[in-house]
Image (cartoon, rainbow, N blue to C red):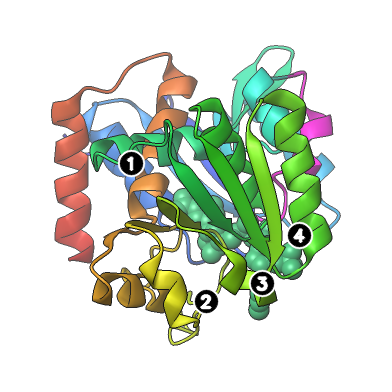
Amino acid sequence: MRQKINGETKVLGLIGNPIEHTISPIIHNILASKLDMNYVYLPFKVENGMLDKAIEGARALNIKGLNVTVPYKEQVMDKLIEITPFAKQIGAVNTLKFTDNGYIGYNTDADGLNASLIKNSIKLKDSKIVIIGAGGAAKAVGMLCAREKCKKITIINRTVIKGQILANNIRQYYNVETKVLGLDEIGKIEPFDIAIQTTPIGMSPKVHDNPIDDTDFYKKFHIAVDLIYNPTKTEFLEEAEKNGIKILNGFGMLFYQGIKAYEVWNDIIITEDILEDVMNELINLYG
Ligand code: NAP
């Protein structure tokens, strides 16, 4: 059913900067339409220094739910009345749910990636994982791998100290073996199971960049995940595929984090048939 905006329409949205590239409004507005719910989801660009006012304003305007993207996933945390324990462990929030007293913060990035991995029969439990990058997305990935009882996490990052901080943070909550290497120490890596690429290297328009051009690296593992979804196949995934490695891009993570946010806002579970319907409509739109 198509959406009609009227006096009872509730507003959802995304705050961040920049946000022009986002496809979240497409996902959520298709969802609202398929579920026949009277919601509209809009992008709200929040300028530097305006986050406080944006959250206050959203609350005053009764905005029922917000997604949060770069650069506000961490800054937003002290503007909330409550944060889920797992979002606290990650140290970032990407979903806000309205309550009469203020917003509650969730992190659906990790669960979005988890859902995408499960859908593609990729198992974190007992796996040796290499995470490339130690930024915001890597925090969610690292904490997810540890929560799902992976065997070992190796973090490779340009700035080694940032990798060490992430590893220490993970070990504060989970009893998992961790190792940290600089990008120039790739040769030291021992065989492992899954590589998860979390840096923006290779993202459009710089589609020919690859964080790891050492060809020996691609002989040491059998599953490659890249959080980037534009392009659909990064240089990193291209190189992995050439070496017979199973590949997965970040579209599923994006899709499922959005689904999980919608479930949080509405206290519902979205059924598989609706999910497939929404996914098919997205594939029709984006090919
Ligand atoms: P971020 O916090 O800025 O972290 C960027 C990471 O990449 C850092 O570890 C940084 O290393 C490294 N890096 C950046 N440029 C580099 C370069 N030229 N050479 C070597 N290392 C470099 O970014 P983020 O929020 O984690 O996002 C990272 C990517 O994940 C983006 O492409 C984003 O679109 C994607 N993402 C996808 C989803 C999804 O749903 N699919 C969700 C979240 C994020 P240093 O520590 O040395 O600076």
The residue pinned by badge 4 equals: 47
The residue pinned by badge 1 equals: 116
| Circle 3: residue type | Glu
Viewer can see residue 222: yes
Please determine whether, in this image, residue 194 is positioned above or below residue 219.
above
**In the picture, residue 238 is in which quadrant?**
bottom left
The residue pinned by badge 3 equals: 185
Query: What is the x, y in percent for residue 118?
Result: 30, 35
Q: Earlier in the sequence, mark 1 or mark 4?
A: 4
Query: For the magenta stretch, what is the residue range?
Result: 70-82
> Closer to the observer: label 3 or label 2?
3
Please determine whether, in this image, residue 106 is positioned above or below residue 114.
above
* Depth check, front residue: 117 or 91: 117
Q: Secondary structure at mark 2?
A: loop
Q: Residue at x 55, y 26 (%)?
A: 147
Please determine whether, in this image, residue 96 is positioned above or below residue 23.
above
Q: Residue at x 43, y 81 (%)?
A: 215
Q: Is mark 3 within 8 Å of ligand 1?
A: no
| Circle 2: residue type | Ile
Quadrant of picture, ligand 1:
bottom right
Measure the C-alpha gap from mark 1 to mark 2.
24 Å
